[in-house]
Image (spheres, grey):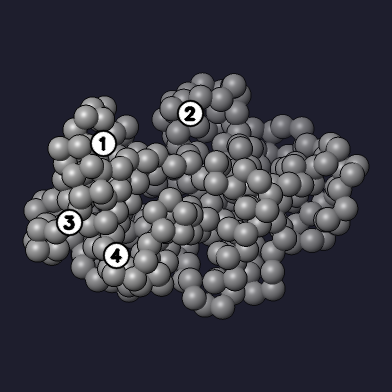
Amino acid sequence: MRAIRVHNYGGPEALSFDEVPAPQPGAGEVLVRVSAIGVNFIDVYHRIGRYALPLPVTPGVEVAGRVEAVGSGVTEFRAGDRVACFLNNGGYAEYVSAAASRVIPLPDGVDERSAAASLVQGMTAQILVDEVYPLKPGDTCLVHAAAGGVGLLLTQLARKRGARVIATVSTDAKAQLAREAGADDVILYTQADFEIETKQLTNGAGVNVAYDSVGKTTFEKGLNVLKPRGMMVLYGSSSGPAPLLDPNSLGGKGSLFVTRPSIYHYIAQREALLKSAGSVFKWIASGELNLRIERTYLLADAAQAHRDLEGRVTTGKLLLLP
């Protein structure tokens, strides 16, 4: 089979399109013929070594497809079932062998491309608004990169929870997408200082929570727009790692909270995985959550997908197709 592998950490050119042996399902595993692969920033972090893995490594944490075969002890799935898989890595391939505990059955009304486009980013958005900082009616949240894959879903779910959403984006086109997703206010950070604008929009009160996937360029100012006892939720670092933080400074800024959640810790148990993914798929099937698949690429063109993602020239979700 063909798969993308990283032999040495580096730029998008480090993604090599290789011929490799097809996996076989071991005990408790499910072999899936992949139909669609979601592209996520964690794939970039695996490629550059920020989250170092033994080399060579195949990136990719979410795929959808059909079950080809099952290993011994697997009774929940059988050949032909439509499924999505949440992986530690290995998804950029024509076939994956995944632990059955990380495989999710797809309901009617959710096709395989939609599943691959929504699994990781949809669960991330759901966990951010329901568990990391449970939003409630009357809350105000700041959502950075609101026209990105997570950002569009996060904005929709925040509004679904009754919260006011202040979104930041880089272009007028992205601003329109954020508004369509339900953002109450949109700040073009390329034209205005989001710290000043957020304070003005809240009459100096600030926001209850800032959802920050950007990191380096937004983190410190984000702390300055939080209400007393507000929470900074740093869940990504697309601009680079956030600056080091002196915990003592949080007291002077209003007894703030800072958290760096990882989706893996919130869905470590199968019950939690099925609950989160099930909620996302239910909302998609019912039309309550709208997906935006920005672009699809052939698996061989994974390097271009990474260039586009890192260049922040895309909105919504990017998919690879084997």
Q: Quadrant of the rendered structure where residue 217 is?
A: top left
Sequence-wise, the earlier of marks 1 and 2 is 2
> Which numbered dot is residue 51?
2
Q: Residue 126, image x and y in percent?
A: 48, 59
Q: Measure the alpha-carbon separation of dots 2 and 3.
A: 33 Å
The reply to whether callout 4 and callout 2 are in contact (CB within 8 Å) is no
Camera-side mark, 4 or 1 = 4
Q: Secondary structure at mark 2?
A: loop
Amino acid type of disc 1?
Answer: Lys
Q: Residue 36, image x and y in percent?
A: 62, 55
Q: Measure the alpha-carbon separation of dots 1 and 2.
A: 17 Å
Instruction: Please report the residue visible at 59 percent of the width from the left and 47 percent of the height from the top.
Output: 267
Estimate how packed mark 4 is, as few (under 14), some (14 to 19) or many (20 or more) residues with alpha carbons within 10 Å. Answer: some
Q: Secondary structure at mark 3?
A: loop
Question: What residue does disc 1 label?
Answer: 216
Amino acid type of disc 4?
Answer: Asp
Amino acid type of disc 2?
Answer: Tyr
Q: Residue 91, image x and y in percent?
A: 62, 42
Vertical order, 58 against 124 (above or below): above
Question: What residue does disc 4 label?
Answer: 139
Using the rendered image of the protein, determine whether residue 2 is visible from the camera's viewpoint. Answer: yes
Sequence-wise, the earlier of marks 2 and 3 is 2
Instruction: Please report the residue visible at 55 percent of the width from the left and 64 percent of the height from the top.
Output: 280
Q: Residue 24, image x and y in percent?
A: 82, 38
Instruction: Please report the residue visible at 37 percent of the width from the left and 58 percent of the height from the top.
Output: 151
